[in-house]
Image (cartoon, coloured by chain):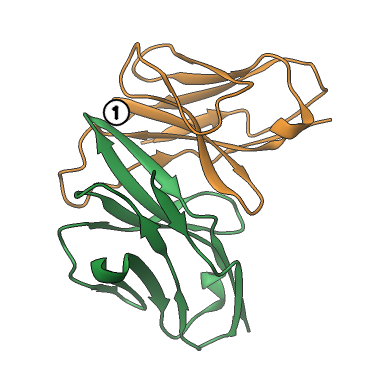
Amino acid sequence: NAGVTQTPKFQVLKTGQSMTLQCAQDMNHNSMYWYRQDPGMGLRLIYYSASEGTTDKGEVPNGYNVSRLNKREFSLRLESAAPSQTSVYFCASSETRWGRMGNQPQHFGDGTRLSIL
Amino acid sequence: AQKVTQAQTEISVVEKEDVTLDCVYETRDTTYYLFWYKQPPSGELVFLIRRNSFDEQNEISGRYSWNFQKSTSSFNFTITASQVVDSAVYFCALGETNFGNEKLTFGTGTRLTIIP
């Protein structure tokens, strides 16, 4: 069972280039998330999707767009990359209800390390 | 707004010592969830524990234990007899529910180094 798969794992871009980070989950989860992790900042939510067809802004959405292509896939797009977007990006997914004991709240992918020169 | 504070940026201890990682949270929700994640040098996020706001019972899992105190809004994590493999960044997170959507707010993390 793959869980949450992110592609690519590493990428280097030049300022102004565009790129789409891909995320897919095979756990039939309804909710999906994109975070960025910067040194000393912890993980910050960029966008999330509570269900197929819906997306909402998180804490740091500027400079990003997302698409919930279907229930499995949630992509993150940088239209015009900037050096400030150099970060490690994590995708996550979760079931919609936390009422069940033992549920891991969000399953994370292994991350995409993105450098923008 | 929800907030999680991990005041300890970095901690170093000698192997076999006990170490406690602090986590203080703020929320207006009456029902909420608290979590700890471990991020080893390889970079992935490993889920350690979840605690519901209505369950203040402390938990022990092997060398790990967690102390949840609503009165002080704290959810501290203790590693007993630390080992080199415990070296990692540890994140505390606070979860809210919003009509079927679950959002996590992370602390800034504590980098733990176990010295052999």
Quadrant (top left/top right/bottom left/bottom right) for the N terminus of chain B: top left
Indicate the position of residue B78 as horizontal and vertical percent values: 40, 77
In this picture, is A67 found above or below A25?
A: above
Subunit of label 1:
A
Relative side of B42 to B66, left or right: right
In this picture, is B87 found above or below B28?
A: below
Q: Quadrant of residue B69?
A: bottom left
Indicate the position of residue A73 as horizontal and vertical percent values: 43, 19
Relative side of B65 to A66, left or right: left
Colour in which the image shows chain B: green
In this picture, is B96 found above or below B27?
A: above
Indicate the position of residue A18 as horizontal and vertical percent values: 71, 15
Q: Which amino acid does label 1 sit on?
A: His
Q: Can residue B68 be seen in this view?
A: no
Q: Quadrant of residue A86?
A: top right
Q: Residue at x 54, y 59 (%)?
A: B109
Question: Residue tagged by mark 1?
Answer: A29
A27 and A38: which is toward the camera? A38
Quadrant (top left/top right/bottom left/bottom right) for the C terminus of chain B: bottom right
Secondary element under disc 1, as helix, strand or loop, is: loop
Indicate the position of residue A1 as horizontal and vertical percent values: 36, 36
Colour in which the image shows chain A: orange
In this picture, is B51 found above or below A77?
A: below
Q: Residue at x 38, y 58 (%)?
A: B25
Q: Which residue is drawn at 39% across and 71% down?
A: B77
Q: Can residue B30 be seen in this view?
A: yes
